[in-house]
Image (tube, helix red, strand yellow):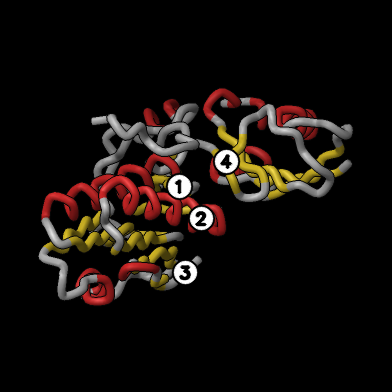
Amino acid sequence: MRVRIRLFAMQREAAGTRELAVAVEPGATVNDAWDAAVALVPALGRGREVLRFAVNGAYAPTSAVLADGDEVAAIPPVSGGDGTAAGPAGRRRILELRAEPFPPGLAGELSGRLATLEDGAVVVFDGRTRVTPGTPAPGQEAEAARHLGARVEGLEYEAFEPMAIAVLGQIADEVAARLGVERLAIVHRVGAVPPGETSILVVAAAPHRDAAFAAARYAIDETKARAPIWKAERFADGHVWIGSPARTSAAAEDAD
């Protein structure tokens, strides 16, 4: 049977392509499909321990059994549905990926679209591009050392967009279930983001400030840990991928 392998960020660069088709035996697992991909492109074998995988847009273990025509996405270390959805009891969500720069006043616009007359608090997290480098992804240490002391000239974001929106929806579900906050926006850039520009906005509206602060913190932390969005720091003569291996499920409820 045939399986499609989707490649992103470091794996895409190593293979020189965004997609591979591999032949595997019936009953093959994700791990078998990846082994077949590595047989075609040996460079993909590097960094296997930090990869996570998704099958047809959802995180899956390497032991998951595949069917003919399945799509397997290789998820390298991450950077760390569009529009507003209204639901029961005043639930409002804005979950977007945008390729264009955020317009001035977007945080206020999102706040106005989310908040109700019952909300006494709106918390905004504005994640901006800085010129100082972050922590390189596993396998990128040598390239990061080559740029030691250099200023970051911009960021380049890449996303597995359908899955990223689905993960943002799961995070919004968790914010509602754990913290009781029903009104949340997560809007993330893709493509090039120069220094000083916003790469992500998180807005949480709630009746009380403690819940709004907690919701915004949970949403940004989980987005960085789980959403299949990758970040490369651009320098004058190269780039470095940034991030950590993706976490495939929600943080424990008793985590700090």
Q: Which residue is mark 3?
A: 82
Label 4 crowd bin: few (<14), some (14–19), many (20+), radius 10 Å: many
Q: CA–CA distance between discs 3 and 2?
A: 10 Å
Q: Earlier in the sequence, mark 2 or mark 4?
A: 4
Three-letter code, disc 3: Asp
- Residue at x-position 15% and y-position 67%: 119
For residue 27, side relative to residue 86 (left or right): right
Question: The C terminus appears in which quarter of the rendering?
Answer: top left
Q: Name which of mark 4 and mark 3 comes first in the sequence.
A: 4
Q: Amino acid at mark 2?
A: Ala
Could you say which disc has been placed on residue 59 in the image?
4
Q: Is residue 64 above or below residue 228?
A: above
Question: At which x and y percent is residue 35?
Answer: 75, 27
Q: What amino acid is at disc 1?
A: Ala
Residue at which label 1 appears: 227
Residue at 42% x, 47% y is 231
Nearer the observer, disc 4 or disc 1? 4
Please give left or right for residue 33 compared with residue 77 in the image. right
Q: Residue at x 43, y 46 (%)?
A: 232
Residue 122 vs 50, above or below: the answer is below
Considering the numbered disc 4 on the image, is that residue within a helix, a strand or a loop?
A: strand
**Residue 127 falls in which quadrant of the image?**
bottom left
